[in-house]
Image: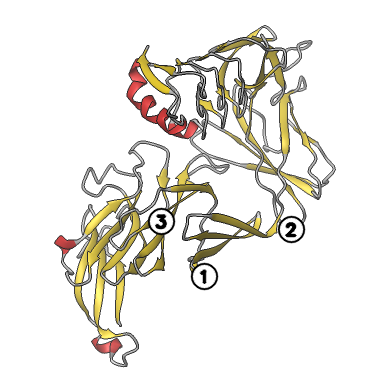
């Protein structure tokens, strides 16, 4: 077979160039005579010739009996190249018997918008069969513990035909790629990932089934992570001890700053369940806290070999409480009119319902008052109203920015959903948040949406509401 290459060119041609060499693989004369025969631009780049920055990455090259396939991630090279920054995954295909630029067909697999905080990583393309390919990539964001665009834990994959066209849905799972290029064993893609959390193997078979195999791992996770600002001016943290832990790692940063500095401290005893972050030079932050500053904490357990998964983030707004007034405790739940709200450091999340709560109309307010102070309600936790048979109407306040998994799933009597907030996004409404509203007992469910977000929300909610033959959804603007 002839040698085939994919070259990331930044000069002439300025493109991802497919090259087919005239010499056969293993030929002795290759070093002297192995010049490329045709050269085909699989993705042309904007910018100036020789400019190192192309705003694209080339991830993979594969072939079928009829085509060559090239995969990578790139900005939209046909638009405003100077100002484009968000990269999406593409696959370009060219027939092997027609190696011409005009024969190249490019298909975009992701559509992250310019100006957003999400983008795609460089993909892997795995040949599962002669005309059957698996494409994998990770989602990148700046919301990890160290900031910057890096994998956020969401792994995507889709099956392609020999022309680079999808033949399946796009699957989403929790996982990562690595420098290990996946191999195919018994028609299953296999690769491994190493990190401070240990060594894991991942597998994906030809039917879309994804599996994780822990080889070296500490599967526990720190839970019930909470904290508050004490009268002394220090920040007190506590958590539930993790079985098998030999110690804990605490990371902290001051958010909403241009610079992203993470401070690190190690608790050396696995039996510990608290830590005081002192407001003094020599403390965890090597300096004083900023008044009004919002501090983000993560905590990990370790067993002497590897780290556990990160805890949920903890946010604490630094305001020293006045003497005699008890500070609200981050992570603690407070009851307001039969609903349980969890303090998040500067806002509240609806986290539960008292057993005595019997109302048929649930109004989640924009703000609540706790200890004579008003705070916004910005989130609804997972499973809060799952399988509640009495709720008929739900009103979401204007500050709601996220809705957890199965928050309102299985509410058989739910016939009206009103959303006043304009802060929701696709990433912030979890899977099955409104699964089967009305169940089989209601013939119609009305969904009221803000006028300026009507089209966006209607499209978004169709992903989060499972339609059934017995339930008809109607949408209205408010």
Residue at 37% x, 11% y is 478
| Residue density around tag 3, few if under 14, some if 14–19, many if 20 or more, within 10 Å | many
Helix, strand or loop at label 2? It is: loop
Q: Residue 55 location, x and y as percent?
A: 32, 52
Helix, strand or loop at label 1? It is: loop
| Residue density around tag 1, few if under 14, some if 14–19, many if 20 or more, within 10 Å | few
Q: Quadrant of residue 379?
A: top right
Measured in 3D between alpha carbons, the distance from the residue under mark 3 to the one under mark 1, in whole angstroms, is: 26 Å
Helix, strand or loop at label 3? It is: loop
Measured along the vertical axis of the image, is residue 453 above or below residue 305? above
| Residue density around tag 2, few if under 14, some if 14–19, many if 20 or more, within 10 Å | few
Disc 1 designates what residue?
A: 186
Measured along the vertical axis of the image, is residue 329 above or below residue 359? below
Disc 2 designates what residue?
A: 305
Residue at 63% x, 59% y is 213
Measured in 3D between alpha carbons, the distance from the residue under mark 2 to the one under mark 3, in whole angstroms, is: 30 Å
Return the disc, 1 or 2, that comes first in the chain's sequence: 1
């Amino acid at each position: 077979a002839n040698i085939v290459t994919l070259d990331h060119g930044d000069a002439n041609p300025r493109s991802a160039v497919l090259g087919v060499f005239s010499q056969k693989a293993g030929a002795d004369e290759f070093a002297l005579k192995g010049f490329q025969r045709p050269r085909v631009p699989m993705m042309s780049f904007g910018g100036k010739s020789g400019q190192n920055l192309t705003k694209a990455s080339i991830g993979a090259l594969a072939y079928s009996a009829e085509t060559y396939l090239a995969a990578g991630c790139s900005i939209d090279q046909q638009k405003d190249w100077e100002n484009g920054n968000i990269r999406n995954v593409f696959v370009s295909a060219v027939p092997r018997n027609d190696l011409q630029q005009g024969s190249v067909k490019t298909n975009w697999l992701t559509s992250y918008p310019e100006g957003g905080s999400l983008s795609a990583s460089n993909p892997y393309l795995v040949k599962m069969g002669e005309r059957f390919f698996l494409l994998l990539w990770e989602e990148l964001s700046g919301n990890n513990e160290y900031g910057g665009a890096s994998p956020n834990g969401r792994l995507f994959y889709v099956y392609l035909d020999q022309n680079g066209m999808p033949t399946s849905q796009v699957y989403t799972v929790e996982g990562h790629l690595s420098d290990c290029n996946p191999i195919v064993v018994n028609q299953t893609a296999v690769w491994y990932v190493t990190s401070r959390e240990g060594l894991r193997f991942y597998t994906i078979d030809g039917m879309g089934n994804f599996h994780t195999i822990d080889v070296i791992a500490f599967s526990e996770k720190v839970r019930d992570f909470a904290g508050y600002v004490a009268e002394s001016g220090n920040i007190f943290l506590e958590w539930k001890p993790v079985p098998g832990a030999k110690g804990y790692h605490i990371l902290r940063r001051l958010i909403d700053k241009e610079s992203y500095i993470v401070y690190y401290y190690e608790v050396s005893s696995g039996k510990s369940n608290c830590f005081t972050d002192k407001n003094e030079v020599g403390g965890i932050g090597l300096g004083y806290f900023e008044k009004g500053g919002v501090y983000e904490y993560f905590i990990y357990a370790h067993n002497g070999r590897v780290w556990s998964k990160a805890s949920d983030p903890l946010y604490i707004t630094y305001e020293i409480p006045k003497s005699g007034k008890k500070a609200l405790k981050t992570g603690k739940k407070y009851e307001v009119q039969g609903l349980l709200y969890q303090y998040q450091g500067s806002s509240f999340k609806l986290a539960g319902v008292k057993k005595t709560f019997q109302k048929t109309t649930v109004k989640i307010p924009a703000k609540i008052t706790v200890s004579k102070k008003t705070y916004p309600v910005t989130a609804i936790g997972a499973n809060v109203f799952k399988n509640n048979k009495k709720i008929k109407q739900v009103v979401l306040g204007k500050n709601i920015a996220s809705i957890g998994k199965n928050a309102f799933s299985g509410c058989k009597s739910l016939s009206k959903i009103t959303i006043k907030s304009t802060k929701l996004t696709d990433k912030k409404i979890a899977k099955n948040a409104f699964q089967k509203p009305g169940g089989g007992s209601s013939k119609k469910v009305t969904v009221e949406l803000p006028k300026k977000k009507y089209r966006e929300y209607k499209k978004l909610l169709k992903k989060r509401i499972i339609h059934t033959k017995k339930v008809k959804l109607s949408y209205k603007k408010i």
